[in-house]
Image (tube, rainbow, N blue to C red):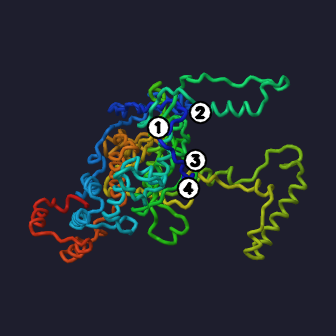
Amino acid sequence: MVSHSAHTVIDPQQERDPPPLPTVVVFPHEKLSSNEAWIQHPPDIYHEYAKVNKPSDLTSEHLQALNLEIQEDVALEDFVPPTVDGLKHLPPQEWGKRAYSAPNSRRNSAASYEIFAHDRYPLLSNGHHAPELDTYVKFVNELYCDTDDGFRAIGRQKPRPGQKTPSLTHYRKFWGVLDTVSTYWDSSMDHYFEGTTRPELTRNKSSFLQKFHVGHHKHHVTPPTTPPKASMKRYRGRRTDTGSNMPDHIRSDCIRNFIEPVASAFHCTIAVPRKGPQVKVKNMLVPVTQSVIVWRNPQDKAQKNNGVLEGPLLGIQCRGSTHFSISDQASTSDAAREIGGLLLLAQERAREGKVKEVPGLGKWYTSKPRWGGGPGGEFGDGDKNKQSVKSSIKTSNTSSSAGGMVSLLYRPSEELIWKQLKPSVGLWEQNMTYLAVGKERGSQYDNVFMISALFHHIAIVKLTVHPLYLEWLNEGTVPKTTPDNTWFSPVIHRTRWYDLFTPEDRAEAMRGLWGVFSYMMRAGPAARRPMLGERQRSEIAHKFNFRKTKHEVAQEDDLDPPRSQSLY
């Protein structure tokens, strides 16, 4: 990950040369719907996708062959499903507003903590405690601050008159990269105008005259002339370039730093894929896009120290496409990338409890030595080849019996490496325990979540898929008997696109992320901590130096919702 710790302070009010015009933000508009008649004549998806040589070859027919349904602009309340026992994992929307309206008020903090203390305080599925409400309030306060105030705090500039410098702790890295993103995308302060003078041209002309003697015939040159009041375009604003020219790694770093505080609060790790992400379609591997993946930290400390991760829990896909208004092909390609990332996560989560597939294991071509013939042996000289291989094997046996230090220094020859027969490494990553983290017990369907990023916006995407559909994708065969008649129609839900330059959208996107992590990292009912008693609740209230009146306690008891309906 590229560091953006050094920030270039840009004064939006400073006059300078105009950058290119801003990139128009138009979101992809690919519409997909499932067909019930698909099961009667399922397509040969292997041969359909084998004809695709480049992304521009993809058409809507390729996506329709998958029989997917896309539902857009889904509300967060309908997006994060409740658990079987009725617990809701999405924090109430009014918490963020109340926290920001009085961020330093102990009364609001205590009241919020009391609401949190009324309900169950769970353990996570890896044995850690769930984050407290104080952490959520801090996150909201850092994201809900004004965008210009956040940039001033990162650039160590003085705050605006009447404003205080916001405290940026958990999201400081995010604000630093967002400041860089604003130099490409933030067109809210763009002001183009006509200028009449250009001081640097005047300085260049005077230095030119001092350097050369205009009256001397040997060095006679004509100085540059500029009309004294030439009309030229000038600019005031935050941008220095257009959004389509922004490098992809800046967007990836911005989204990663936006998600990392919430992932750390739920004891998860964000890691880059160690192998090229590929979706398996029968015997064909289709490359897909996957920026980073969120994994769950194991409960065993020894495994955690060895770098073992569990999951995947959540995917993050950042795409740099910007020209969706020019042609429909861009929307089709973008939808294919998003669907490919979701199917990859679904296939990895479906590996739970399965044996690792090693390509070529037990085959003759990975166990039987052979040589196709030809003069000179395998390396051009048969006798020398046999002697070098025998010496390498002898050196290997001597090194292993001598001790550990000598064996570490041993380096096999190229001939010995070439003669070794072993199967391929396969698609499974090392030190990864594939688990369907967060899958509802007793349910055949799996909910796969992914963060989709375009421009300076993010959206949360969810794929609800049946294991029979993944089996059809891997093997290409339709099961004869099916317990569910809707297994062949996966559904993709997508929230609206949240603008990271808008405080309300930043806080709302973080609220959705918090709900997704709380849902995916939940533990069983037996692992939940019992409700706090009256004594513990009074100690919490005393911690904030706040004492409620009898009238306030009576009002809260009347408005208190049933405890079984909300996790918070």
Can you tell which of label 4 and label 3 is closer to the viewer? 3
Which x, y percent locates residue 34? Answer: 35, 33
Q: Which residue is mark 4?
A: 429
Q: Secondary structure at mark 4?
A: loop
User: Looking at the image, is mark 2 or mark 1 earlier in the sequence?
Assistant: 2
Which x, y percent locates residue 286? Answer: 54, 40
- Can see residue 283? no
Q: Which residue is mark 1?
A: 237
> What amino acid is found at the position of numbered circle 1 in the picture?
Gly
Crowd around label 1: few <14 · some 14–19 · many ≥20 (10 Å)? many
> What amino acid is found at the position of numbered circle 2 in the picture?
Pro
Residue 276, numbered label? 3
Q: Is residue 448 left or right of residue 525?
A: right
What residue is rendered at 55% in x and 61% in y? 431
What residue is rendered at 53% in x and 28% in y? 57
Q: Is residue 198 left or right of residue 75?
A: right
- Can see residue 258? yes
Mark 2 and 1 residues: CB-CB less than 8 Å, in contact?
Answer: no
Residue 78, placed above or below residue 204: below
